[in-house]
Image (tube, rainbow, N blue to C red):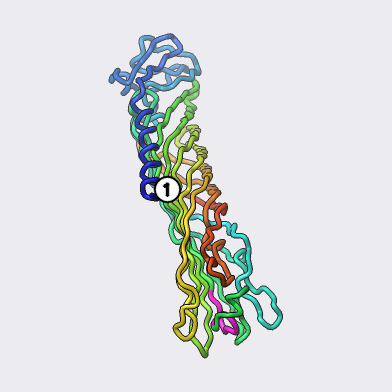
Amino acid sequence: MRSESVTLRAWLGVSLCLALVSSPRLAAAEPDGSIYTASDSSLLMARRQVDDGHLRESGYPDESRPEESVTCCPIPSGRLCPCSYFWAEGLILGRDNQSDGQPLVLDLNTNEVLFSTGDLDFDWAGGLRLGYGTRICNCWAIEFGYLGVFDNSASAGVELEDSLMLPGDLGLQVNNFFGADEVDLQYESDLHSFEANLVRCCCCCDCAGHCRSIEWLAGFRYLNFDEDFSISAFDSAEGTTEYAVETDNHLYGAQVGSRYRRCRGAWSWEATGKAGIYGNDMEQSQDPIIDFPAFVFRPGRESDDTDVAFVGDLNFTAVYQLTDIWGLRMGYNLIWIEGVALAADQLDFTNTPDSGTELEDGGGVFLHGVNVGAEARW
């Protein structure tokens, strides 16, 4: 049933995109009343140029134009509203830990909390962002994008000979979770995002050759966000026992957004914002807890659920033009994901038949960091 639900949601999203793409072609009207469509190949290849203090555009019936005009450009304008475009960027992102902060390691002599889930600090992680768009008619383009953040991790360790314990029933009833010498914590996550958008681009230039564009986008997006959390307790007399949890979030939904770009000389700057509401198919699984000596204290447990999630992106990028086609990109990113199941929130230190079977959702993830890469627009 879960696979059928996932397939149905994906098919509905793709059908929506195809329906929008197949809508009637729109023509763009110029200020003088002339209308140009994408079928006018000569106009599609025309170039904007500044001459005698006025913006001119070759291929128009009257080459004299106002000093500034705003229109949904029926022809590509250099770096704005191009026929095709591509970008590739490396990402370096940090993550804020937004888990609920439950205790993980206690001093059994004083009952002091030595470490909780909220104390874990994530390292900077590498990632990749790719995108490609192509004009399909007049102002409209179709755009595809991928974003990945790999091996976002946090780890910590506590050592106190024969004095460490885990909280709750597990700390009192599992041999290696009571009176341990060392406890190690490991938290890891990965994010993969795929999207397809319809983009409508409008642009304008003033008499000094300063140009700008705004693009409106809407489309379908899928995100996979998975996490692993493990607690390893070591005792010199009895060995190691591990408590490991994994979560997997599959987000499907629609998003809307806009992109503003401004050019001046060899430099451009760009601001992009996107937001969407998603259905989240979540699942969590917990490995068996094997106590000393090779005793299964708790068998493996798992559960799944569905809920609504939110994803928002902001990107601010500066572009330096190397050639008419190629440019270098450098910017800053903010990514917010809300309504997901975090592995740290699934930890259950009770000992009942239902322990480890409840799925805790509603967690949040906030990523931020830089992007560096290149683009091509032609």
User: Measuring 42% from the left and 45% from the top, which residue is drawn there?
Assistant: 222
* 368 in the magenta segment: no
Compared with 176, 281 (above or below) is above
Quadrant where the C terminus sits is top left
Residue 144 visible in image: yes
Judge left or right: residue 140 versus residue 273.
left
* Residues in magenta, as a range: 176-184
Q: Residue furthest right?
A: 110
Q: Nearer the viewer, residue 247 or 202?
A: 247
Query: In the image shown, does 179 or 327 lie closer to the viewer?
Result: 179
Q: Secondary structure at mark 1?
A: strand
Amino acid type of the residue that numbered disc 1 sits on in the rendered structure:
Ser
User: Whole-percent x and y of residue 50?
Assistant: 43, 21
Residue 139's quadrant in the figure? top left
Q: What residue do we see at 49% from left, 66% from top?
A: 245
Name the residue located 50 percent from the left edge and 77 percent from the top edge: 297
Label 1 CA crowd tier, 10 Å (few <14, some 14–19, many 20+): some
Tell me how many marks there are: 1
Q: Main secondary structure of the magenta part?
A: strand
**x and y percentages locating residue 30 in the rendered image:** 43, 14
| Residue closer to the observer: 46 or 310 | 310
- Residue 43's image quarter? top left
Residue with the mark numbered 1: 193
In the image shown, does 181 or 133 lie closer to the viewer? 181
Q: Position of residue 229 (x, y in %)?
A: 50, 66
- Is 147 on the left-hand or right-hand side of 111? left
Residue 374 in view of the camera:
no
Residue 319: percent from left, percent from top: 46, 40
Reply above or below: 297 against 212: below
